[in-house]
Image (tube, grey):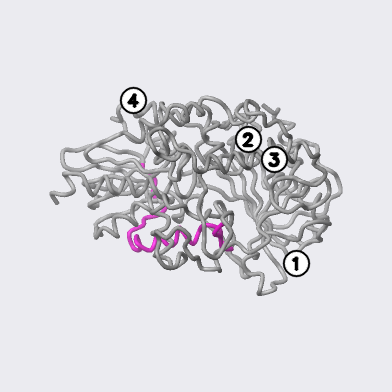
Amino acid sequence: MTSRRDFLCTVGAATLAGCAPQGNPPLPPGELLGMNHALGHRLREGDFPATSETRRTGVLIVGGGISGLSAAWRLARGGVDDFLLLEMESEAGGNSRAGESPLVAYPWGAHYLPLPGREATLVRELLAELNVLQGDPQAARPTYDERFLCATPQERIWRHGLWEEGLLPHRGVAAGERAQQRRFQARMEELKVARGRDGRRAFAMPMELSSRDPEWLALDRISFRQWLSANGFDAPSLHWLANYATRDDYGTAHDHTSAWAGLHYFACRDGEAANAAPDTVLTAPEGNAWLARGLARHAAGRIVTEALVWRIEEGKAVVAVDVLQGAKTVRYEARQLVWAAPAFVLPRVWGAIPGELKAAALAGDYAPWLTANLHLADFPEERHGAPPAWDNVFHDSPGLGYVTATHQLIRRRLRGTVFTYYRALHEVAPAEGRRLLLETPRAAWAEGILGELERVHPDIRRLTTRLDIFRNGHAMRRPLPGSLWGGAREKLVNFRHPRIALAHADLSGFSLFEEAQYRGVMAADQVLASPQFRRL
């Protein structure tokens, strides 16, 4: 692992480490934002006020991320309106929340959705409901609303002082390495249609639909880097691409990512469209917030924010849930509970949690993450090579690059824009990354981010009118080798209780919209099918 000082010098806290250049102009204004760690850390401290009020509901959903909103979506579509959703933050949406300026909306986290394949039926249902997928949701190649199809160019990469189209480096690459790139791409196409001896696709989305053939599941026991090397893929450009992919989706370097998860990234995405190329993504200026809002419409008036669940107790006919709301504790009595918050929190609030479930919930490892939004008075100076794209990736840089919020509004010819910068803190242990997020001042992060970006855009510091930083200490569960198949994760999936259902992307072992939605819907279906619920 990288040392703390080296990390600070290269990742964004340069001034704190004493290695920042002197004489830079004043930093633009902004805020240091993030998940409400102060409220969340109250669970460690305890000492909550006594219950002052009791409320009752049929179904109580804890967690307002995509899983919780999807559970509410399913319940409402099933004709159930006796439910409430509790969210610790000031608004629902989880990793799909967004901000908005007078110019444009912009994401704070997840910012795209791949074209859903035919197995992703729930995603297609939602997109059809939102009229983004037009026509038959089960069509092999549906038509999509062009406003949500990422405008071209979609991606470019900054490498050796030039922008290149796409994500796979190609300028100056020797013939032997180019041949290896083609072989890798051909292998990924083969894996997209590969099936196990049980007839299932080797890598499906949602991942629960994937083959259980031991030959494929054995890939979970090695790292993605090991798989590449064992299969003759030693080209630096391929290892860079694999490492970028796992950092981007999992917050983890490819030598610490399960090979099954790494291959899933490339092989599960088989969606097509009648009016777009297969590798096109769905996006909007606000990232995936439009999807979260679409789900949340079904929970309108039933979402309670700034609500911290601190105790769960089972009764004969109800589950009692004590919730800190402001300075008071409100007790909610529900006939059914859907836990759609991160799994590691559950043992802290459910004293009677079964031992095996507790161990499984605590077995996960979570990636810390940093996002920044830079508000620009005008587009910065461009260098040579490929033209501006939606996703702008840096080859030799601690950050992942940035997405441009106004890219979908290209026809409006706006003068200013917002760049959303992403950084997975993967070089240090997750606990150390979380400490850095808590302890590092905004000025240090901002200085490092501007220093990184001005290597590509020399005038970006002058054009940045505001720079806000968002910290997420437990952004996503990391799919480490051995974490996906035959272990703790599957114990979470297989857990059954007469009144408590689990719903979170943690049950999939990694955080993607499709996985979170699937787990939320499955938990809602478990509630709808329970004998206690059917007797109501």
The region drawn magenta spans 281-309
Task: Tell which circle, 3 or 4, labels the residue nearer the N-terminal end.
Answer: 3
- Label 4 crowd (10 A; few <14 / some 14-19 / many >=20): few
The image's mark for residue 378 is 1
**Amino acid found under the numbered disc labelled 4:** Glu
Task: Tell which circle, 4 or 1, labels the residue nearer the N-terminal end.
Answer: 4
Check if residue 1 falls in the magenta segment.
no
Task: Tell which circle, 1 or 3, labels the residue nearer the N-terminal end.
Answer: 3
Residue 153 falls left or right of residue 205? right
Provide residue 387's location: percent of width, then percent of height: 76, 61
Q: Name the residue that disc number 4 marks.
A: 356
Task: Tell which circle, 4 or 2, labels the residue nearer the N-terminal end.
Answer: 4
The residue lying toward the viewer, choosing from 80 and 430, is: 80
Q: Name the residue that disc number 3 marks.
A: 181
The residue lying toward the viewer, choosing from 36 and 278, is: 278
Label 2: which secondary element: loop
Spatial separation of the CA atoms under disc 4 and disc 1: 55 Å
Query: How many numbered marks appear?
Result: 4
Spatial separation of the CA atoms under disc 3 and disc 2: 26 Å
Q: Is residue 394 above or below residue 274?
A: above
Task: Tell which circle, 3 or 2, labels the residue nearer the N-terminal end.
Answer: 3
